[in-house]
Amino acid sequence: MLPMGDPGPGDERLADAGLGLMTLGDQVSISFVSFGSPAERMRLESGWNVTEVMVPADRPAPEWFYLPALLLLGGIIALQRRRARG
């Protein structure tokens, strides 16, 4: 949900978003949030733990799943019309 800007080095992107992270063992915590930054507008606070990082997945648009359904529907209609004539 935090806008990270253009692709580039992770530490620069986090700094541009106004967020500083600190690792302690296997935990990652927010060390600081810059005033007026996108991180502050998202109401992130110092001391919170980062539990997961979600990135968008490359997957086909959901509209492509309509195509097989429409083809199946067209096939059923064709079979029913042929059956009604016979």
Image (cartoon, grey):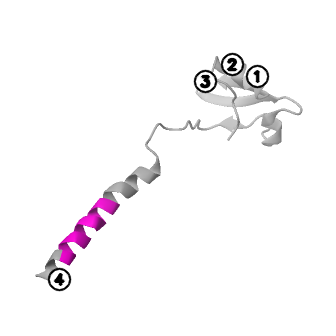
Secondary structure found at label 4: helix
Q: Residues within 10 Å of mark 1 (few under 14, many from 20)?
A: some
Instruction: Give the image location of residue 64, x and y in percent.
Output: 40, 50
State which mark lies toward you, 4 or 1.
Answer: 4
Single out the mark in the foreground, 3 or 4: 4
Q: In the image, which is nearer the foreground, mark 3 or mark 1? A: 1
Extreme residue in the left direction: 86
> Toward which corner of the image does residue 75 lie, by quadrant?
bottom left
Rounded to the nearest angstrom, the CA distance separating label 4 from label 2 is: 68 Å
Q: CA distance from mark 3 to mark 1?
A: 22 Å
Q: Is residue 32 left or right of residue 12?
A: right
- Kindly check if marks 1 and 2 are in contact, taking CB atoms under 8 A apart as contact: yes
For residue 15, which numbered disc appears in the image?
Answer: 1
Looking at the rendered structure, which numbered label has been put on residue 11?
Answer: 2
* Residue 14 part of the magenta-drawn span: no
Q: According to the image, label 4 marks what residue? A: 84
Q: Disc 3 versus disc 4: distance between alpha carbons?
A: 72 Å
Numbered mark located on residue 45 in the image: none
